[in-house]
Image (cartoon, grey):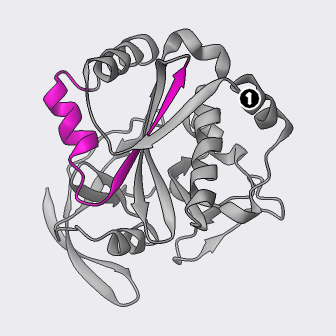
Amino acid sequence: MRIESAHLGDGVRLPVLMTDEHECPYLPDRAAREALLLTPVDDAAFYQQLMDWGFRRSERFFYRPGCDGCRACTPIRVPVERFAESRSQGRVRRRNADVEVRVAEPTLDEERWSLFTRYQLEVHDKPMLRAPAEYVGVFCDSPIESIEMAYYVRGRLVGIGLLDVCPSALSSVYFYYDPREARRSLGVFSGLCEVEECRRRNLPWWYLGFYIAGCRKMEYKSRFRPYELLDPDGVWRSPGADGAAA
């Protein structure tokens, strides 16, 4: 690892820690590394600016990809007022007409931990976190305002979405669901609900993290249209007239 001075944009330079190379979790046969911002961040407005410079939050760390010779990880966002629900997304919405959505501060209890661990084991085959204290550190102990969107069917918890709140955007952090409810397409439904929460709060942008062309786990993000991608010159642009991937 090494410390560098990174140009972020608008003439701003800040120190970052370049991690060692490791196996890329998204694309096969590639190596990855991250640039970790060394400046503490506890201001949502500054975090939104960081997102416009290609950074994301993980726990209390703010990072962006720093892979040599690869720019596959591209920040993606949706202009909320221009978003147009597709026919398939409309079917998902109707399929989940019985779902109740509750918005509150992130928290952890036995029901949430049980749902989270079941999701990790059945969907990802291995635990992402091994103890409730780790969950609190990752999802509840945020340096900026965060919210939890909890999804219930007849009083039973079936999904949890975690988001960061910025001055003009919501930023998706993580979503997990009950694998027994896979037919509901709760991941798609949660995205529709997050767009609606942006509208309810009069926030013009919904940030989805990184889009990676060729990565199946990321393909769903390009189905929320129109969308914009952050180009290397620091300008957000729509890939096509209708927001479809080029």
Residue 220 figure quarter = top right
At a point 57% along the width and 39% down the height, the residue shown is 218
Residue 196 place in picture, x, y as percent: 63, 51
At a point 31% along the width and 86% down the height, the residue shown is 12
At a point 58% along the width and 77% down the height, the residue shown is 235
Q: How many marks?
A: 1
Task: Name the residue at the bottom extreme.
Answer: 11
- For the N terminus, the quadrant is bottom left
Residue 41 figure quarter = bottom left
Using the rendered image of the protein, determine whether residue 66 is visible from the camera's viewpoint.
no
Using the rendered image of the protein, determine whether residue 171 is visible from the camera's viewpoint.
yes
Q: Which residue is mark 1?
A: 92
- For the C terminus, the quadrant is bottom right
Q: Amino acid at mark 1?
A: Val
Residue 205 figure quarter = bottom right
Q: Secondary structure at mark 1?
A: helix
User: Is 79 a magenta residue?
Assistant: no
Residue 112 place in picture, x, y as percent: 33, 23
Against 48, residue 128 (above or below) is above
The crowd level at tag 1 (other Cα within 10 Å; few <14, some 14-19, many 20+) is: some
At a point 66% along the width and 15% down the height, the residue shown is 183
Residue 114 place in picture, x, y as percent: 31, 15
Magenta region: which residues?
Answer: 129-153
User: Is 139 a magenta residue?
Assistant: yes
Task: Name the residue at the front extreme.
Answer: 155
Against 192, residue 41 (above or below) is below
